[in-house]
Amino acid sequence: MASYSFSLSASWWLLALCGIAAAALSWYAYSVTTPPISPARRFTLMALRLLGLWILLFALFEPIVNVLRATEEPPSVAILLDNSESLSLRDASRDRKADYLAALKALKPETLNDALPEAVSEITLFANDASTVPAKDFVPDSMRLDGQFTNITKPLQRIFQNAERTNTQAVLLVTDGAFNEGENPLYAAEMLARPMVIVGVGDSTEAKDIAVRSVITNEVGYVDSELPVNITVQSSGFTEGAATLVLRDNGETVAEQTLPLRGTESRTVSFVYKPKQAGMHTLTAEIKNQRSSNQSGLEGELTTKNNAYSEFVNVLKNKRKTLVLAAQLSPDISFIRSSLEANSNVQCNVYVEDMKGGFLDNVAAAQDGKPLETSPKRTLETLRQDLADAEAIVLVGFPLTSTPLSFIEVVKTELSRGKPVLFVASQDLDWVRLRPLEPFLPFTTLSGSKQEMLALPDVKQPALASPVMKLSGTDADLKAWNQLPPLFRTETLVRVKPEAEVLSTVKLNNVPLAEPLLVQRTLNNTKSLAILGYGLYRWKLLGFAAEAAKGREVPDIFGTFFENGLRWLSTSDQGKFVRIKSSRKVYGSGESVELTAQVYDRSYNPLDGADVRVTLQSSALKQAREVVLSALGGGRYAATVEGLGEGEYSFVGTAAVNNQKYGEDSGRFSVGRVNIEYQNLRMNAVFLRRLAESTGGQFFTAEEVAANPDAVRRAIQSSPNYKARPITLRSDIALWNLAWLLAAALVMFAAEWFLRKRSGMV
C-alpha cells in the first residue's frame, strides 16, 4: 500500500500569482504583432510561451512528490555452526563428526528444514574467527572442521551489531560447547537478548583419557635459582595403573614423577628445577606410558593430543648487577648493602663519596668502625664503567652540595640510556643539585628543606596491585604495611609526575596527608622508584627484628620491598629499541604464525623505514628460514608465516637502518605441540543448557535433531518476538531535478522561436 503527497519549497499562492503574471506577460507579448498574424497562430505562440514559463516557474519552486509505502519484513534466524577441530573427535561412545553432519543434513540449515525459506540469508561458520557463507551455497560436507580455537562470543557480538538491521529474532547454534577463547558467551547472549536454540554435538559422558590441563610457573626465572612449577593433570576412565609425568626444559628431561590412576580426578603436581642457561626456555609437561618412556599417552586412551602442555620462561642471568651510589655513609647504606648481598641473585657494587672528590675504599670496613680510606682503584672512570655494566642504579642521599658535578653528569648520562633507578632521600640531600636527574625520577621538587619529621606510611588497597608492594599476596599485606614504624622525612615539597603512581603517602600524628612517601613510574618502558624518606633501618630493627625477637612470625618488609623493587626495575626492557614477538606462544598445527615488531628511535618515538628481518630455526626446518616484515606505519612491522610443521621454534630478529644494524630481539614459540581443542573431550551439555535457558531458547542433542528436525523449527517459531515487523519506506521524488522537465521547457521555447521565424516576426 502506498500514499502520495505533493509539496513545494514556497507557498502555493505565490506560485499561482507568478503563473498569472506569466499568463499576462504572454498575452501582452502577442496582443499586437508585427507583422500581423492569424488569431490561431497568435494563440499558439502565446500558449507555447506560457507553458514554457509555467514549467520554469514549477521547477524554481522545487516541487517534491512524497511516497510512503507500508510493508512487512519477515523475521530472520542467525545460524552459527562450530567449525573447530573438536567437532571431528570421536567421543567415548559416538563419532562426533558423523552426528554433527547428520544433524545438519536433517536441519537443512540453508532453508531451515524448508519451513522458513526467507529466514536464512547467510550461515556463519566460527572457530577462533568467523566467516559467512551464503545460504544457497552451503553444503554441510564442505565444512573442514579444522579451527584451532573456539570463540563463541565473537560471532554473537557480530549478530548483535546487525540484529536490528536484519530483524534477527532467533539464533540457532550448533556446537559442542567447548569454547576456549574469548569471554564467556553468557554475557554476549544476555546482551543479544534473542532466544538461542542450541544443538549440542558430542557425548557428555566421561571418556577414557588423561590430559595435562595447565603448567603454572613464573614468567621470569634466574640461572641456578629454583623455579617452582605446578602442573594440573586430569584423568578419567582409568581405575588402575600409573602414568609418568615428565617435565622437559627445551626438550631435555629435568624431572619426572609417577602418577597412580584412581578414576576421575584432577590433581596438581609440583616440580622444582634450576635453569642452567639464560634465555627463553620452553617448559613442557608430558604424560608418558610407564611401560615405554618413548610412548606418549596410555593404552586405550581416547586421544594423545592433550598429553602435553608448554609454557615459556624468560631466564635471566643469575647475577643482577646493582650499583649503589651514596654521597655519604649512613645506616641506610649498611642495611641496603646487607639486604642486597644476602640475595644470591644480586651482585652489589657500592660507591660512597669520601668528601674529597673520590670514593671510599672498603665501605663494609668503614661501617664496621675502621678508618676511612680513599681508594685509588675507585675513580670517576671506574664509576662510569660500573654504571654502564649495572642493570639497576640505587641512589642513596645523592647528591650533596659537595658532590662534584662530574659525578652527577656521569649518572645523568647512564640514566638517559634508559637505566632503571631506585632513589632514597636523606636529610643532607641537595635538592637543587638533584634537578639534573629529575627527568628520570617520578617526581619534581618544588622546594627543598632540611627540617626533619617522623612520618608513618599510609598505604591504600589499590597500591597492593603493584608488584613492588606484594608481601604474601593476601589481605594481610595492607595491615602489615600500615603497622610499620615511621621513617624520617624532611619538609621538602614535591610534585608527583602525571604518569607516576603513588604507592604510599604519609601520616603525621595519625593524620593522613597527601604528601608521597613511595612513588613508582614507568615511562617509555623505563622504570624508576623513589623513597622520599630515610631511616629505612627502622623498618628492619623496630619492625621485623623487634617482633622476631618476641618469637612472632612477621614479614621482613624491608628485605622483601627491596627484592621486589629491584626485580621490578631490572626486568624492564630498558634501552630496548627493537621489540619482536609472535602473536601467541602456542599455535595449533597448520595455523599461521604472526610476527610483529616495534622499532623506536633513541627518544622512544616510533621509527619508520627500518629493514626488519626474522630468522626462524627449528629441528622441524631443514635450514633456517628468513622472514621479512612489512612496514605498517607508526614504527610497526608485521609478517604472517605459513606452512610451519609441528615443533619448537626459536627466532632472532634484527632491524637495520641505513644498512646499519640498529637492534635485535629474540623469542620462541611452538606449533602443534599443544592443541587446546583436545583439552575437553566431552560435550559441555551443562553450559549449553544454561545458555539456552538464560535466553529463553531450547536445547537439543544432535541425535534428537536428526530424529525430529521439526522440533527446532517449532522452538524457533514459538518465540513471542518471532514475527514480521512493519516497515514504512519513505521516498522523495524531486521533480524539479528531473532532466525531462527542463527539456520540456526548452522544447516550448524552441517551438515558439521556430513559429516566430516562420511568421517573419522579429
Image: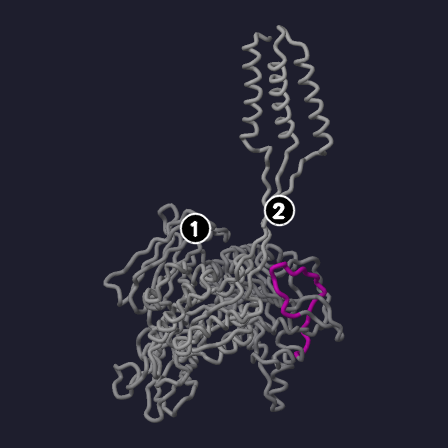
Indicate the position of residue 186 as horizontal and vertical percent values. 53, 72
Of residue 388 and residue 253, the one placed in the foreground of this image is 253
Q: Which residues are magenta?
A: 484-504
Residue 682 vertical position relative to residue 53 in the rendered view, above or below: below
Residue under pointer 2: 3
Seen in the image, is 134 located left or right of residue 498? left
Indicate the position of residue 4 as horizontal and vertical percent values. 62, 43
Seen in the image, is 720 located left or right of residue 627? right
- Residue 345 visible in the shown view: no
Indicate the position of residue 252 as horizontal and vertical percent values. 30, 77
How crowded pointer 2 is (Cα within 10 Å; few <14, some 14-19, many 20+) is rated as few
Residue type at tag 1: Leu
Of labels 2 and 1, the one closer to you:
2
Residue type at tag 2: Ser
How crowded pointer 1 is (Cα within 10 Å; few <14, some 14-19, many 20+) is rated as few
Residue 571 vertical position relative to residue 737 in the rendered view, above or below: below
- Quarter of the image where one finds residue 586: bottom left
Q: Callout 2: helix, strand or loop? A: strand
- Quarter of the image where one finds residue 122: bottom left
Residue under pointer 1: 632
